[in-house]
Amino acid sequence: GESVGLHLPTLSVQEGDNSIINCAYSNSASDYFIWYKQESGKGPQFIIDIRSNMDKRQGQRVTVLLNKTVKHLSLQIAATQPGDSAVYFCAEMGGKLIFGQGTELSVKP
Amino acid sequence: SAVISQKPSRDICQRGTSLTIQCQVDSQVTMMFWYRQQPGQSLTLIATANQGSEATYESGFVIDKFPISRPNLTFSTLTVSNMSPEDSSIYLCSVESLDTQYFGPGTRLTVL
């Protein structure tokens, strides 16, 4: 079946560095993608989204890149802070929202 | 974005019992969803709940085990019936609002 997966299950970065979290998707019909941040004991929090007619979208300290040719999605976090430590999920919308496995981001002070 | 609350936030239950989880949204929404997140794993869609119709269940989930109510456009309940330790998970309510999907804080269920 269709699935969304992540390349790296864990990522450890130094405070102030940039973080890049990657995601592969397999449903070429998906036209909408979302990144969520989930802190311990909380529900997923919407970070940023992108539609399939775009290849880049920027928010505050975050950028999402979409490469439809290779079905790849990435989340870039600039100047990573300790408060960014969480599990990050990508999700694709192809009729229903399907989640990837998640990457745990750990920020070292 | 929609503000979503869930009750209870957590519970510890005995096997064989049932628990009903409530989800309240601060605005009227057409689409509401229930997800399960097993320990250390990603989110899996249980069912879609639309007001005025029966919930639509995903493969592997059945109405007898996870009955859902959707009495109005701001409220839904999910019941976990005849619980076993394998039902220990976080259960999350989600709504579609302004073309994206938002999540509640979750209900952490432990079944002994």
Image (tube, coloured by chain):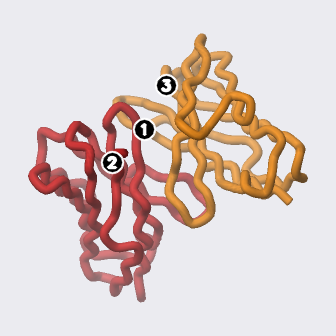
Chain colours: A red, B orange
Please tell me which residue is depicted at 26% across the width and 50% down the height of the picture: A26
Which chain is disc 3 placed on? Answer: B
Mark 3 secondary-structure assignment: strand
Q: Earlier in the sequence, mark 1 or mark 3?
A: 3
Of the residues shown, which amino acid type is indicated by label 2? Ile
Please tell me which residue is depicted at 34% across the width and 46% down the height of the picture: A2
Rendered image quadrant of residue B4 = top right
Mark 2 near mark 1, Cβ–Cβ under 8 Å? yes
Image coordinates of residue A104 in percent, x first then y, are 44, 72
Residue A100 lies, with reference to residue B100, above or below; the image says below
What is the number of callouts on the image? 3
Q: Are marks 3 and 2 on the same chain?
A: no
Mark 3 near mark 2, Cβ–Cβ under 8 Å? no
Tell me the crowding category of disc 2: few under 14, some 14 to 19, or many 20 or more residues within 10 angstroms, Cα based: many
Please tell me which residue is depicted at 58% across the width and 19% down the height of the picture: B73
Give the residue at mark 2. Answer: A34
**Residue that extends furthest to the top in the rendered view of this protein:** B52
Rendered image quadrant of residue B16 = top right
In-front residue for pair A80/A97: A97
The CA span between labels 2 and 1 is 9 Å
Which chain is disc 2 placed on? Answer: A
Give the residue at mark 3. Answer: B31
Tell me the crowding category of disc 3: few under 14, some 14 to 19, or many 20 or more residues within 10 angstroms, Cα based: some
**Horizontal arrangement in the rendering, residue A105 relative to residue A48 (left or right):** right
Image coordinates of residue A24 in percent, x first then y, are 26, 58
Quadrant of the rendering where the N terminus of chain A is positioned: top left
Give the residue at mark 1. Answer: B101
